[in-house]
Every structure is written in structure tokens, then in C-alpha cells.
Amino acid sequence: MKKLLCIILAIAVLGAVAGCGADASAETGSGASGPIAQVLSAELFTDASTAADEDEDEDDAETVYVDLEEVSGIYEITAAGKYELSGSLEGQIYINAGDEDKVQLVLNGVEIIAPSGAAIYAVNADKVSISAKSGSVNTLSCPNDFIQTDENTVDAAIFAKCDLVIKGKGTLNIDCACGHGIVSKDDLTVKNCTLNIVSTKKCLSGNDSVTIESGTLSLTSGGDAIGSDGDTVISGGEITASAAKKGIDSELSATVEGGTLTVAKSTEGIEAETITISGGMTNITASDDGINAAVSNSEFNGGAMNRGGFGGGSNANITISGGTLIINAGGDGVDSNGTLTVTGGETYVSGPTNSANGAIDYETEGLISGGIVVACGASGMAESFGSSSTQGSILYNFGTNYEAGTTVSLKDSSGTVLAEYTPESSFSSAVISAPEVVSGGTYTITAGSDEYTVEMTSVIYSNSGFGGGMGAMGGMGAMGGMGGGHGMNGGGRADMEAEGQAQGMNDGSMGGRRTGGEGFGGGMGRREMT
């Protein structure tokens, strides 16, 4: 009905105001910006069916149709409006509109090769939206080093100094051999479209924020896949990222509210001062930490800002309240240089396999009040949740190393499985929590064919000699106490939150029993912050 009404209105408008239209011009390039641009005149008319099909949430607007085959070098846009581009171009789309102007680009089978700059460069506008038209395939390529033509450091296939929206129901492919994929110096939003980016630096970068609402994204980066000096929010979509560095590196916060995020390769999956997982499916593979909450230090080494280390600080925090989080980490699985709070969702961790890291690691406080957690890794730095938790949690050091692919499960006294996970790496300890785990209950942990009995004498159980959180900011972590001996005397305090070099103390809680053998006491260790 809307489409029909628009067509009727369009016919009436064409008859009355045939000469109306938005300004579009191509001006002569200068300096190192490339060859002389061809001046074009574009006929303006409204195609209501195209507008409705392309983007139903956008108001219909007069459209400038541009055949890039007729353009040489640079096509410049100087006014607000909707511009539908088609064809091939060796050069650049250059947007230099007014401060209040909103510019819409519709890509309809576009192929742009930018020899020495951005394929699309928005130097000035209030907001630019780039939409891949339904059914179309569009390609932007930057094969060479960037040559700067003004005071801005342009280093992306799409570079905008304003708010930028990438959307549409078509496909946009970006290949940037010497820079970023897409950069906005304000807010960057992605929705609906199929977006494939290969870049040597960040695939998506938003100075103030990056928001992914929907769409199918494939991000392959020689640096970070997604980065922001502000906030990153993923509320939907299907995102697959492979990064030489971090999957998401966000200065202030990183939030996953929905959708599917798969970080197939990274050094760290997600890093930000505040990390919130409240929905969706997140699957991370990282050579170092899976998710890492750390405060960024304002220290520059060669232009790079450092994060974390012993300056982590208590402002860093991780909150997991919903969704499913799966981590396979070579370093810490879930690492907060401040607080860790789990109130819901499902969290499963594989790794680390080295005793210098832990499946769960926090500096000041770790609390659980809901959700399911199964975190399996090495026992040397294994850490449980703190005693202020309201949901039962078990840290169990098995005294033996199980191979990757060995299923770990927790059952109650009636044999009901409360939590289960099959780690992707070898492990010798597990942190397990589920809503049904309570003080006074008796539970069985199964690892492969072995069974271990746990009697909960408090809300937190541990047969490990290593304490809980780290000490005060910048101080040395808690010194793990000697592990309990055989049989009934295992276990040190799981919630030790010492300042400086506090000595871990045994609390005499009930030790675990391995069926057919003796209990295994925890080792001795010292926490180091990473």
C-alpha cells in the first residue's frame, strides 16, 4: 500500500516539479588526490519502489542516479540527498557536504578500486549512510599505501569524519591491503547487510562507538577485528571474526546483548574496561585471555596506548547476566582486573593448559548469584568465586591431567545432571556452579570415567590451596597456602582476597573423595596479574 501511494505521489510530483533536485557535482581533484574528476550532471527523479525495496525505514527521497562508468577519477557529492551508484570506477567517492546534511549512498553493483586513498571518503556531513541494494554485490578495494591529500590521516576503504551507517539487503565486500576496512570518527552502526571485510588493520573502527544491530559479517583482520575509543555494542547479527590481535578492543565498554559472535582467532577475544554479556551466543578462541576487563593507561609507547598490567584498577569489571559464552583460551579464560559478577547465562571455559593462568581470574571480587559456569583449566592458578556469593560454587583440583575432549559433569544426589561441558583443551581442575548447588548438598563430579564426591559445607567449596582474588591495586597477589593432605583434609579458602603478600590459609573444609582412591590436596602458588 505504501509503495502504491508513493508511485501515485511520484507521478504527481514529476508533473509539477520536473526541474527540482538535489545538487550533485564532480569537481577537479588536486595534488595527490588522483586524476582530474569528470563533471557530471545527474537527472533527479523519485523511484518509490526502489526506495521502499532498498530501505523501508528510510523516508523516500529524490534520487541521483550515477553511472560510475562515466566518471573519471573522483565523484564529489556536495549536498544532502540520495545517490544510487552503479558500475565500476578507479578513483573515489568524495563527500564534502554541509554540516547539517545527511547523505545516502545506495550501492547497486558497484566496484571501486582506489589506487592511493579511500574508496569512499566523507570529509564533511552530518551523517552518511551507505546501503547495499537488495540483491546486489558491491566491492571496494584499496590495494596500495595511502597517500594523504589533506590534514586528515585517511587509512580505510571507507573513511568518514561523521556518523556512519552501513546497511542494506545486499552484499558489500571490502579489501584493504594497507589499512582499516571501515572507519568513522564518530559513531559507526552496521545493520541488515552482508558485509565481508579483509584488512591489515581494524575491520570496523568507530571513534565514539561501534554498534552492530543485525546482518551477516565476516571480518578478517591483521590487527583487531573491531575497535572503538568508546563503546562497542552487539545486539544482533551473525558475526565471524578472525584477528591477528583482538576480536574486540573497546576503550570504555564492550556489550553483547544478542546475535552470534564467533571470534575464531585472536590474541584476546574481547577487551574493554567494562565487559557485559547479557544475551546471544559468544564463542571465543584466544591465544591469551578469552575476555579481559582492564583500565587503559594513558601511557603511549610509539603511539600505542597500553592497557591493563599492574595498573588494572578496581574500575574494571565483567558482568555476565545472560546468553551463552564459550571460551577456549591459552591465557586466562575470564579475566577481570577488577570485579567479576555472574548473575545468569551459561559460561563454559577451556584452558589454560599452563599453570601461569587460570580459567577464572579476578583482582578484587568474584561473585556468582545465578547461571551456569563450567571452567576447566590448569590447577596452578585455579580460582573460585568469593564467599559473598549467594549461589554455590565448586573449585576442584583433580590431581591428574585429563585430555581434551573429556566430558565434565556435575550431578546432584539423585543423579540429575546440573551442568556439563566437554573442554577443547586438557585440564586438571574445574570451577563448576549451577543454581541447584547449595550449602549442605552432596554432589558428584564426573571427569571421563572418574567420579569425585563433594560435600558442600558452605556456599563455596574448594580442595585447592590457592586463594581467591588478588590484593590491592598494583600489589602482589595472594600467596597460595599449602594444599590439604590426603582424604578428608583437603582445601584452602576459595575466597582469599588478600592485600600484598597474604599467606593463604587452610580452612579445614571437607575434602573431596575420589572413588577408589585418595583425595588430592592443592598446590602452592603466587598470583600474577596479566
Image (spheres, helix red, strand yellow):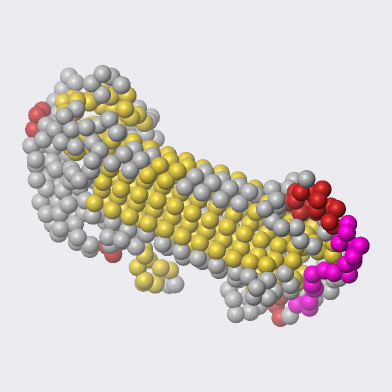
User: At x 65% / y 54%, what residue is drawn?
Assistant: 167
| Residue 414 in view (yes/no) | yes
Magenta region's main secondary structure?
Answer: loop
Quadrant where the C terminus is found in the figure: bottom left
Query: Looking at the picture, how far across and down is residue 331, in whole percent?
Result: 34, 48
**Would you place residue 257 above or below residue 210 in this image?**
above
Of residues 530 and 19, the one drawn nearer to the viewer in this rendering: 19
Residue numbers of the magenta segment? 11-29
Residue 342 falls left or right of residue 115: left
Query: Looking at the picture, how far across and down is residue 141, in whole percent?
Result: 68, 59
Rendered image quadrant of residue 387: top left
Query: Looking at the picture, how far across and down is residue 507, in whole percent?
Result: 9, 40
**Would you place residue 329 above or below residue 123 in this image?**
above
Residue 54 falls left or right of residue 314: right
User: At x 15% / y 58%, what residue is drawn?
Assistant: 499
**Would you place residue 192 above or below residue 456 in this image?**
below
User: At x 70% / y 52%, what residue is drawn?
Assistant: 55
Rendered image quadrant of residue 449: top left
Query: Looking at the picture, how far across and down is residue 46, in whole percent?
Result: 83, 59
Of residues 50 and 210, the one drawn nearer to the viewer in this rendering: 50
User: At x 13% / y 37%, what residue is drawn?
Assistant: 491
